[in-house]
Image (cartoon, helix red, strand yellow):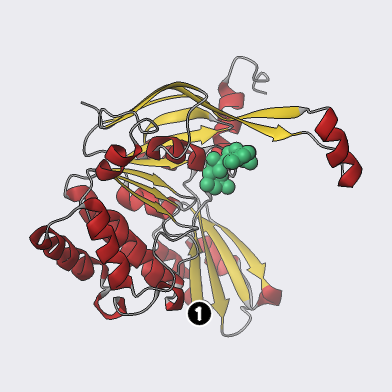
Amino acid sequence: MARIEADDLRKVFRRPDKGPGLAGSLRHLVDRRYTEKAAVDGISLRVEAGEAVAYVGPNGAGKSTTVKLLTGILVPTSGEVRVNGIVPHRHRIENARNIGVVFGQRTSLWWDLPVRDSLELLRDMHGLGAAEYRTNLDRLVEMLGIGDILSSTARRLSLGQRMRADLAAALLHDPPIVYLDEPTIGLDIEVKDRLRAFLRQVVADGTTLLLTTHDLGDIEDVCSRLVIIDRGRIVHDGGLRQVIETYARERVMHADLATRPASLAGIATRLAGATVTEERDGLALAVAFDPLAHTAGDVLTAIQSEVDVVDLRIEEPAIEDVVRRMYAGQLATGPDAPPAS
Ligand SMILES: Nc1ncnc2c1ncn2[C@@H]1O[C@H](COP(=O)(O)OP(=O)(O)OP(=O)(O)O)[C@@H](O)[C@H]1O
Ligand SMILES: [Mg+2]
Protein backbone atom coordinates (compact mmCIF):
# COMPACT_ATOMS: atom_id res chain seq x y z
CA MET A 1 0.00 0.00 0.00
CA ALA A 2 1.25 3.40 -0.90
CA ARG A 3 1.71 5.66 2.10
CA ILE A 4 0.31 8.72 0.38
CA GLU A 5 -2.28 8.57 -2.39
CA ALA A 6 -3.80 11.71 -3.84
CA ASP A 7 -6.06 11.57 -6.84
CA ASP A 8 -6.99 14.75 -8.70
CA LEU A 9 -6.89 16.65 -5.44
CA ARG A 10 -8.16 20.25 -5.51
CA LYS A 11 -8.48 22.97 -2.94
CA VAL A 12 -10.19 26.18 -3.91
CA PHE A 13 -10.08 29.17 -1.61
CA ARG A 14 -12.76 31.79 -1.84
CA ARG A 15 -11.67 35.29 -1.10
CA PRO A 16 -14.07 38.20 -0.58
CA ASP A 17 -13.78 40.56 -3.49
CA LYS A 18 -14.13 43.86 -1.63
CA GLY A 19 -13.44 47.40 -2.65
CA PRO A 20 -11.05 49.36 -0.44
CA GLY A 21 -11.99 50.83 2.92
CA LEU A 22 -15.22 50.90 4.86
CA ALA A 23 -17.33 51.67 1.79
CA GLY A 24 -16.03 48.53 0.10
CA SER A 25 -16.73 46.43 3.20
CA LEU A 26 -20.28 47.79 3.45
CA ARG A 27 -20.97 47.17 -0.22
CA HIS A 28 -19.67 43.62 0.21
CA LEU A 29 -22.35 43.06 2.90
CA VAL A 30 -25.16 43.58 0.44
CA ASP A 31 -23.48 42.44 -2.76
CA ARG A 32 -21.18 39.56 -1.92
CA ARG A 33 -18.65 38.78 -4.57
CA TYR A 34 -15.79 36.37 -4.29
CA THR A 35 -12.75 35.49 -6.28
CA GLU A 36 -11.98 31.80 -6.38
CA LYS A 37 -8.46 30.57 -6.44
CA ALA A 38 -7.38 26.95 -6.80
CA ALA A 39 -4.36 26.68 -4.52
CA VAL A 40 -4.13 22.98 -5.34
CA ASP A 41 -5.47 22.30 -8.81
CA GLY A 42 -5.69 18.61 -9.61
CA ILE A 43 -2.76 16.93 -7.93
CA SER A 44 -2.29 13.18 -8.28
CA LEU A 45 0.55 11.67 -6.33
CA ARG A 46 1.56 8.28 -4.95
CA VAL A 47 4.33 8.00 -2.43
CA GLU A 48 5.46 4.50 -1.49
CA ALA A 49 6.64 3.43 1.93
CA GLY A 50 10.20 4.55 2.61
CA GLU A 51 10.38 7.10 -0.21
CA ALA A 52 11.88 10.53 0.45
CA VAL A 53 10.18 13.05 -1.80
CA ALA A 54 11.13 16.69 -2.23
CA TYR A 55 8.00 18.74 -2.81
CA VAL A 56 9.12 22.06 -4.20
CA GLY A 57 7.90 25.03 -6.17
CA PRO A 58 7.82 28.83 -6.19
CA ASN A 59 6.08 30.92 -3.52
CA GLY A 60 2.35 30.41 -3.54
CA ALA A 61 2.57 27.21 -5.64
CA GLY A 62 0.37 25.27 -3.22
CA LYS A 63 2.92 23.28 -1.23
CA SER A 64 1.72 24.15 2.26
CA THR A 65 -1.88 23.72 1.15
CA THR A 66 -1.05 20.19 -0.02
CA VAL A 67 0.58 19.39 3.31
CA LYS A 68 -2.49 20.73 5.13
CA LEU A 69 -4.72 18.49 3.00
CA LEU A 70 -2.53 15.51 3.89
CA THR A 71 -2.72 16.28 7.60
CA GLY A 72 -6.50 16.76 7.49
CA ILE A 73 -6.28 20.41 8.62
CA LEU A 74 -7.99 21.33 5.33
CA VAL A 75 -10.85 19.56 3.57
CA PRO A 76 -10.36 19.18 -0.19
CA THR A 77 -12.79 20.88 -2.54
CA SER A 78 -12.72 17.74 -4.70
CA GLY A 79 -10.58 14.69 -5.35
CA GLU A 80 -9.44 11.87 -3.13
CA VAL A 81 -6.70 11.63 -0.57
CA ARG A 82 -5.54 8.78 1.61
CA VAL A 83 -2.63 8.62 3.99
CA ASN A 84 -1.76 5.14 5.20
CA GLY A 85 -5.17 4.09 3.95
CA ILE A 86 -7.01 6.75 5.97
CA VAL A 87 -8.87 9.80 4.65
CA PRO A 88 -7.12 12.51 6.70
CA HIS A 89 -9.92 15.09 7.11
CA ARG A 90 -12.46 12.41 8.10
CA HIS A 91 -10.21 10.76 10.67
CA ARG A 92 -7.87 13.45 11.88
CA ILE A 93 -7.00 11.76 15.16
CA GLU A 94 -6.21 8.39 13.61
CA ASN A 95 -4.30 10.15 10.85
CA ALA A 96 -2.30 12.07 13.45
CA ARG A 97 -0.98 8.79 14.88
CA ASN A 98 0.56 7.95 11.51
CA ILE A 99 2.14 11.27 10.71
CA GLY A 100 4.67 13.71 12.09
CA VAL A 101 4.50 17.30 10.88
CA VAL A 102 6.74 20.33 11.19
CA PHE A 103 5.75 23.68 9.76
CA GLY A 104 9.05 25.53 9.90
CA GLN A 105 7.35 28.90 10.26
CA ARG A 106 5.47 27.87 13.40
CA THR A 107 6.15 25.79 16.45
CA SER A 108 4.06 22.99 17.88
CA LEU A 109 5.73 23.43 21.27
CA TRP A 110 4.06 25.30 24.10
CA TRP A 111 5.92 28.61 24.34
CA ASP A 112 5.99 28.91 28.11
CA LEU A 113 6.68 25.31 28.99
CA PRO A 114 10.08 23.67 29.20
CA VAL A 115 10.64 21.55 26.09
CA ARG A 116 10.56 18.41 28.24
CA ASP A 117 7.04 19.25 29.47
CA SER A 118 5.84 19.82 25.90
CA LEU A 119 7.21 16.42 24.97
CA GLU A 120 5.48 14.80 27.97
CA LEU A 121 2.17 16.36 26.91
CA LEU A 122 2.67 14.91 23.45
CA ARG A 123 3.51 11.53 25.01
CA ASP A 124 0.13 11.60 26.78
CA MET A 125 -1.72 12.81 23.68
CA HIS A 126 -0.27 9.93 21.66
CA GLY A 127 -0.78 7.49 24.53
CA LEU A 128 2.84 6.32 24.48
CA GLY A 129 3.93 3.85 27.16
CA ALA A 130 6.75 4.81 29.52
CA ALA A 131 9.29 2.46 27.94
CA GLU A 132 8.47 3.47 24.38
CA TYR A 133 8.62 7.15 25.33
CA ARG A 134 12.03 6.73 26.98
CA THR A 135 13.49 4.83 24.02
CA ASN A 136 12.18 7.27 21.40
CA LEU A 137 13.12 10.34 23.40
CA ASP A 138 16.64 9.13 24.17
CA ARG A 139 17.23 8.41 20.52
CA LEU A 140 15.93 11.80 19.33
CA VAL A 141 17.84 13.69 22.01
CA GLU A 142 21.01 11.97 20.94
CA MET A 143 20.49 12.37 17.17
CA LEU A 144 19.40 16.00 17.42
CA GLY A 145 21.79 16.98 20.20
CA ILE A 146 19.08 18.60 22.31
CA GLY A 147 19.93 17.21 25.76
CA ASP A 148 20.85 20.61 27.15
CA ILE A 149 17.76 22.46 25.96
CA LEU A 150 15.09 20.16 27.42
CA SER A 151 14.70 22.35 30.47
CA SER A 152 14.45 25.66 28.55
CA THR A 153 11.09 27.08 27.55
CA ALA A 154 10.44 27.13 23.82
CA ARG A 155 10.27 30.92 23.99
CA ARG A 156 13.95 31.11 24.93
CA LEU A 157 15.32 28.84 22.23
CA SER A 158 17.26 30.06 19.22
CA LEU A 159 15.69 29.28 15.86
CA GLY A 160 17.97 26.28 15.27
CA GLN A 161 17.32 24.90 18.76
CA ARG A 162 13.60 25.39 18.34
CA MET A 163 13.58 23.60 15.01
CA ARG A 164 15.41 20.62 16.51
CA ALA A 165 12.99 20.53 19.43
CA ASP A 166 10.09 20.71 16.97
CA LEU A 167 11.49 17.77 15.03
CA ALA A 168 11.74 15.78 18.25
CA ALA A 169 8.12 16.66 19.02
CA ALA A 170 6.99 15.60 15.53
CA LEU A 171 8.84 12.28 15.62
CA LEU A 172 8.27 11.33 19.24
CA HIS A 173 5.56 8.79 18.44
CA ASP A 174 7.72 7.27 15.70
CA PRO A 175 5.28 7.95 12.85
CA PRO A 176 5.76 6.07 9.55
CA ILE A 177 5.12 9.28 7.56
CA VAL A 178 6.67 12.68 8.12
CA TYR A 179 5.90 16.00 6.41
CA LEU A 180 8.36 18.80 6.86
CA ASP A 181 7.41 22.20 5.49
CA GLU A 182 10.53 24.39 5.25
CA PRO A 183 12.36 22.80 8.18
CA THR A 184 15.63 24.60 7.49
CA ILE A 185 14.25 28.07 6.84
CA GLY A 186 16.43 30.77 8.39
CA LEU A 187 19.00 28.35 9.78
CA ASP A 188 22.71 28.84 9.41
CA ILE A 189 24.75 26.36 7.47
CA GLU A 190 26.06 24.34 10.43
CA VAL A 191 22.60 23.79 11.86
CA LYS A 192 21.31 22.95 8.38
CA ASP A 193 24.02 20.33 7.96
CA ARG A 194 23.14 18.78 11.26
CA LEU A 195 19.44 18.68 10.38
CA ARG A 196 20.15 17.19 6.98
CA ALA A 197 22.25 14.44 8.56
CA PHE A 198 19.37 13.78 10.94
CA LEU A 199 16.87 13.59 8.08
CA ARG A 200 19.11 11.17 6.17
CA GLN A 201 19.07 8.95 9.22
CA VAL A 202 15.28 9.18 9.55
CA VAL A 203 14.92 8.16 5.90
CA ALA A 204 17.47 5.36 6.27
CA ASP A 205 15.33 4.05 9.13
CA GLY A 206 12.46 3.57 6.68
CA THR A 207 10.33 6.64 7.35
CA THR A 208 8.39 8.04 4.40
CA LEU A 209 9.26 11.69 4.00
CA LEU A 210 7.68 14.59 2.15
CA LEU A 211 10.01 17.57 2.36
CA THR A 212 9.07 21.05 1.28
CA THR A 213 11.90 23.50 0.93
CA HIS A 214 13.33 26.35 -1.10
CA ASP A 215 16.82 25.04 -0.47
CA LEU A 216 18.24 22.73 -3.13
CA GLY A 217 20.94 21.57 -0.73
CA ASP A 218 18.29 20.05 1.53
CA ILE A 219 16.83 17.91 -1.18
CA GLU A 220 20.10 16.84 -2.77
CA ASP A 221 21.21 15.52 0.57
CA VAL A 222 18.03 13.85 1.65
CA CYS A 223 15.65 13.03 -1.21
CA SER A 224 15.76 10.80 -4.27
CA ARG A 225 12.54 11.90 -5.93
CA LEU A 226 11.61 15.41 -6.90
CA VAL A 227 8.08 16.68 -7.37
CA ILE A 228 7.85 20.26 -8.60
CA ILE A 229 4.57 22.09 -8.40
CA ASP A 230 3.63 25.41 -9.87
CA ARG A 231 0.26 27.16 -9.61
CA GLY A 232 -1.30 24.15 -7.95
CA ARG A 233 -0.21 21.58 -10.53
CA ILE A 234 2.61 19.08 -10.76
CA VAL A 235 5.04 20.13 -13.48
CA HIS A 236 7.71 17.51 -12.81
CA ASP A 237 7.73 14.20 -10.96
CA GLY A 238 10.79 12.06 -11.21
CA GLY A 239 14.45 11.74 -10.50
CA LEU A 240 16.29 14.48 -8.76
CA ARG A 241 19.75 14.19 -10.25
CA GLN A 242 18.70 14.71 -13.83
CA VAL A 243 16.78 17.90 -13.07
CA ILE A 244 19.58 19.31 -11.01
CA GLU A 245 22.14 18.45 -13.67
CA THR A 246 20.01 19.96 -16.41
CA TYR A 247 18.68 23.08 -14.76
CA ALA A 248 20.68 23.72 -11.64
CA ARG A 249 24.25 22.95 -12.54
CA GLU A 250 25.68 26.36 -11.90
CA ARG A 251 27.17 27.23 -8.52
CA VAL A 252 28.52 30.65 -7.62
CA MET A 253 31.44 31.07 -5.25
CA HIS A 254 31.60 34.50 -3.64
CA ALA A 255 35.02 35.23 -2.17
CA ASP A 256 36.02 38.19 0.00
CA LEU A 257 39.60 39.19 -0.80
CA ALA A 258 42.43 40.56 1.32
CA THR A 259 43.50 42.95 -1.45
CA ARG A 260 42.33 43.92 -4.92
CA PRO A 261 43.69 41.50 -7.53
CA ALA A 262 45.73 43.09 -10.32
CA SER A 263 43.59 41.30 -12.88
CA LEU A 264 40.92 38.62 -13.05
CA ALA A 265 42.27 37.16 -16.27
CA GLY A 266 44.61 34.68 -14.51
CA ILE A 267 41.76 33.20 -12.52
CA ALA A 268 39.50 32.91 -15.55
CA THR A 269 42.24 31.16 -17.54
CA ARG A 270 42.62 28.48 -14.88
CA LEU A 271 38.88 27.80 -14.83
CA ALA A 272 37.72 27.11 -18.36
CA GLY A 273 34.03 27.83 -18.80
CA ALA A 274 33.64 29.72 -15.53
CA THR A 275 32.62 33.37 -15.32
CA VAL A 276 34.56 35.64 -13.00
CA THR A 277 33.09 38.97 -11.95
CA GLU A 278 34.25 41.68 -9.60
CA GLU A 279 32.15 42.57 -6.57
CA ARG A 280 32.36 45.20 -3.82
CA ASP A 281 34.73 47.50 -5.70
CA GLY A 282 37.20 44.74 -6.42
CA LEU A 283 37.49 43.54 -2.82
CA ALA A 284 35.36 40.52 -3.58
CA LEU A 285 34.64 38.39 -6.59
CA ALA A 286 32.06 35.95 -7.81
CA VAL A 287 32.93 32.86 -9.81
CA ALA A 288 30.05 31.07 -11.53
CA PHE A 289 31.11 27.49 -12.29
CA ASP A 290 29.83 24.08 -13.26
CA PRO A 291 30.55 21.66 -10.39
CA LEU A 292 30.94 18.80 -12.87
CA ALA A 293 33.79 20.70 -14.57
CA HIS A 294 35.47 22.20 -11.49
CA THR A 295 35.23 21.36 -7.81
CA ALA A 296 34.80 24.16 -5.28
CA GLY A 297 38.38 23.35 -4.25
CA ASP A 298 39.63 24.00 -7.80
CA VAL A 299 37.87 27.34 -7.83
CA LEU A 300 39.34 28.35 -4.49
CA THR A 301 42.82 27.28 -5.58
CA ALA A 302 42.50 29.32 -8.78
CA ILE A 303 41.48 32.43 -6.85
CA GLN A 304 44.22 31.95 -4.27
CA SER A 305 46.83 31.68 -6.98
CA GLU A 306 46.23 35.40 -7.55
CA VAL A 307 45.06 36.83 -4.26
CA ASP A 308 44.39 35.89 -0.59
CA VAL A 309 40.84 34.90 0.25
CA VAL A 310 39.50 35.95 3.66
CA ASP A 311 36.01 34.49 3.48
CA LEU A 312 33.82 32.59 1.07
CA ARG A 313 30.32 31.40 0.48
CA ILE A 314 28.85 29.15 -2.19
CA GLU A 315 25.48 30.00 -3.61
CA GLU A 316 23.26 27.25 -4.94
CA PRO A 317 20.55 27.94 -7.48
CA ALA A 318 17.15 28.72 -5.98
CA ILE A 319 14.20 26.47 -6.70
CA GLU A 320 12.60 29.46 -8.40
CA ASP A 321 15.45 29.56 -10.92
CA VAL A 322 15.15 25.84 -11.57
CA VAL A 323 11.45 26.17 -12.32
CA ARG A 324 12.05 29.19 -14.53
CA ARG A 325 14.74 27.35 -16.46
CA MET A 326 12.56 24.28 -16.81
CA TYR A 327 9.90 26.38 -18.47
CA ALA A 328 12.47 28.08 -20.65
CA GLY A 329 13.84 24.64 -21.61
CA GLN A 330 10.38 23.34 -22.46
CA LEU A 331 9.69 26.42 -24.56
CA ALA A 332 12.96 26.06 -26.37
CA THR A 333 12.26 22.45 -27.36
CA GLY A 334 8.46 22.50 -27.55
CA PRO A 335 6.34 22.57 -30.71
CA ASP A 336 6.06 26.36 -30.61
CA ALA A 337 9.78 26.90 -30.33
CA PRO A 338 11.23 29.34 -32.84
CA PRO A 339 13.30 27.61 -35.53
CA ALA A 340 16.95 27.29 -34.57
CA SER A 341 19.05 29.83 -36.41
N1 LIG B 1 -6.40 30.07 3.97
C1 LIG B 1 -6.26 30.62 2.78
N2 LIG B 1 -7.20 31.44 2.24
C2 LIG B 1 -7.08 31.96 1.00
N3 LIG B 1 -6.03 31.73 0.20
C3 LIG B 1 -5.05 30.93 0.66
C4 LIG B 1 -5.11 30.33 1.96
N4 LIG B 1 -3.99 29.58 2.13
C5 LIG B 1 -3.27 29.71 1.00
N5 LIG B 1 -3.90 30.51 0.12
C6 LIG B 1 -3.43 30.85 -1.24
O1 LIG B 1 -3.17 29.65 -1.92
C7 LIG B 1 -1.99 29.72 -2.71
C8 LIG B 1 -1.04 28.63 -2.30
O2 LIG B 1 -0.54 28.87 -0.98
P1 LIG B 1 0.47 27.91 -0.23
O3 LIG B 1 0.67 28.44 1.14
O4 LIG B 1 0.00 26.51 -0.36
O5 LIG B 1 1.78 28.11 -1.10
P2 LIG B 1 3.26 27.55 -0.86
O6 LIG B 1 3.61 26.78 -2.08
O7 LIG B 1 3.35 26.87 0.45
O8 LIG B 1 4.11 28.90 -0.88
P3 LIG B 1 5.40 29.35 -0.01
O9 LIG B 1 6.58 28.86 -0.78
O10 LIG B 1 5.31 30.83 -0.05
O11 LIG B 1 5.27 28.76 1.37
C9 LIG B 1 -1.45 31.12 -2.48
O12 LIG B 1 -1.89 31.92 -3.55
C10 LIG B 1 -2.09 31.57 -1.20
O13 LIG B 1 -2.29 32.95 -1.18
MG1 LIG C 1 4.40 27.25 2.19
Q: Looking at the image, is 206 positioned above or below residue 316? A: above
Depth check: give the residue in front, 304 or 82. 82
Q: Quadrant of the N terminus?
A: top left
> Which quarter of the figure has residue 114?
bottom left
Residue located beneath label 1 in the image: 309
Residue 169, image quadrant: bottom left
- How packed mark 1 is, by other alpha carbons closer than 10 Å (few <14, some 14-19, many 20 or more), is some
Asked if one can make out residue 185 in the rendered structure from this viewpoint, the answer is yes
Q: Between 9 and 111, which is closer to the camera in this rendering?
A: 111
Direction from residue 24 to residue 171 in the image, left or right: left
Q: Nearer the viewer, residue 58 or 271?
A: 58
- Residue at (11% x, 62% y) in the render: 130
Judge whether 336 appears above or below 38 on screen.
Answer: above
Q: Secondary structure at mark 1?
A: strand
Q: How many marks?
A: 1
| Quadrant of residue 86 within the rendered picture | top left
Tell which quarter ligand 1 is in. top right
Q: Is residue 190 left or right of residue 249?
A: left
Residue 238, image x, y percentages: 37, 31
Which residue corresponds to the image point at 39% horizontal and 42% vertical from the top-left? 54
**Residue 36 horizontal side relative to residue 108, left or right:** right
Q: Residue at x 78, y 27 (%)?
A: 33
- Residue situated furthest right in the rendering: 23
Question: Is 282 placed above or below 97 here?
Answer: below
In the rendered image, residue 276, in percent from the top left (x then y), is placed at 59, 62
Rendered location of residue 160, percent (x, y): 41, 70
- What amino acid type is highlighted by mark number 1? Val
Asked if ligand 1 lies within 8 A of label 1, the reply is: no
244 to 215, vertically: above or below: above
Q: Which quarter shows the C terminus?
A: top right
